[in-house]
Amino acid sequence: MAKIFVVEDNQGLSEAITSYLSVEGHNVVLFERINGLVEAAVMAVPDLIVLDVMLPDGNGFSAARAIKEKVDIPIMFLTARSSESDRITGFELGADDYVVKPFSMRELVLRVRSLLSRTHTKNIEKDDVVYTYSLKDEEGRMHTLSLDESSHTCTQNGTEKKLTATEWKILEYLSSHHHVLISREQILGQCLDYLADGSQRSINTHIKNIRAKLDQLNWIETVRGFGYRFIGNKEE
C-alpha cells in the first residue's frame, strides 16, 4: 500500500481518482489547492503525488519545482494541456509521468501501478552491486560513472547525481546494454511499462535531463531515427 497525494480541484474527478486508488489498496490524501501541499509533502513524504497542472491558487509546475527542491518524490502530472511543449516542461521539472485529460480511470491506475513498481525497488533489500563505467572526453580526460543497484544512486567522478526514478531506470537499462543500440520502443517497454501517444517524444526529454545531470558528458549517444547507445566502458 502506498501513500498518494492527489491534488485536483474538480470534485467529480478527484472523487473518482480517490475511489479507484483506494480500491487498489492505497492511502489517498486529497488536496484541492496548492496551498499547504509543499509543506505537507516535506513532512509526510508520500510515495507519489498525482498533481493537476492548473489549480485555482497556482500552477502545478511551480509546485512541483518547489517540492523537488526539498524532497525527491515521484510526481505524475494531470493536465488538459496536451502540447508537446507542456509535456516537455513537465519532464524537465523532474516529473515521472504526464497524463493528458480526458483519461480513463483504468489507464490512471495502470500508470500509478507502473510508476510505484519502479520507485518501490528503492526500498527493497538487494545485494550491494555497484557497476562502474569509464569514458574519455574530447580533451582526453577520463571520467567514471558508478550505478549502485542497492541504493539506486548514481555517482559521477565521486559526486552523487540526483535522478528521478524514471531517469534512473533508463540509465540503468542503457548502461546494462552498453555499446548496444536500443530503440525508443525498447526503452518505453522496459522502463515505462506502457506505450501511449506522444510517449516516444518523452523519452527524448528524459535523455536530455539525464545528460544535463551528468554535466553533458557524452555517456549516451543518439542514433538519429532509431534510439540510443550507452558508450561508457564497463570496469571489471
Image (tube, grey):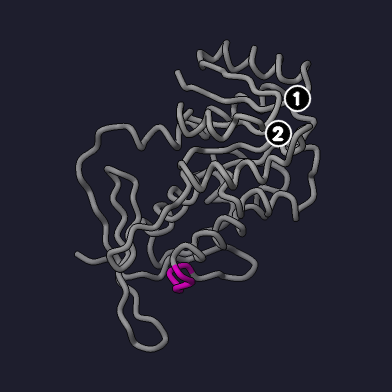
Q: In the image as oriented, which residue stretches furthest toward the bottom?
A: 139
Marking on residue 52: 2
Residue 26 lies, with reference to residue 118, above or below; the image says above
Q: Which residue is drawn at 62% across and 25% down?
A: 6
In the shown orientation, is residue 159 left or right of residue 66? left
Q: What stretch is highlighted in magenta?
A: 215-220
Q: Which residue is drawn at 70% across and 34% down?
A: 52
Q: Quarter-wise, where is residue 175 in the image?
A: bottom left
State the predominant SS element of the stretch in magenta.
Answer: loop
Helix, strand or loop at mark 1 = loop
Instruction: Give the residue pinned by disc 1.
Output: 9
Residue 214, position as x, y percentages in the image = 44, 65
Q: In which quarter of the image is the C terminus?
A: bottom left
- The 10 Å Cα crowd at callout 2, few under 14, some 14 to 19, many 20 or more, is many
Q: Residue 216 lies in magenta, yes or no?
A: yes
In the shown orientation, is residue 73 left or right of residue 13? left
Q: Residue 189 lies in magenta, yes or no?
A: no
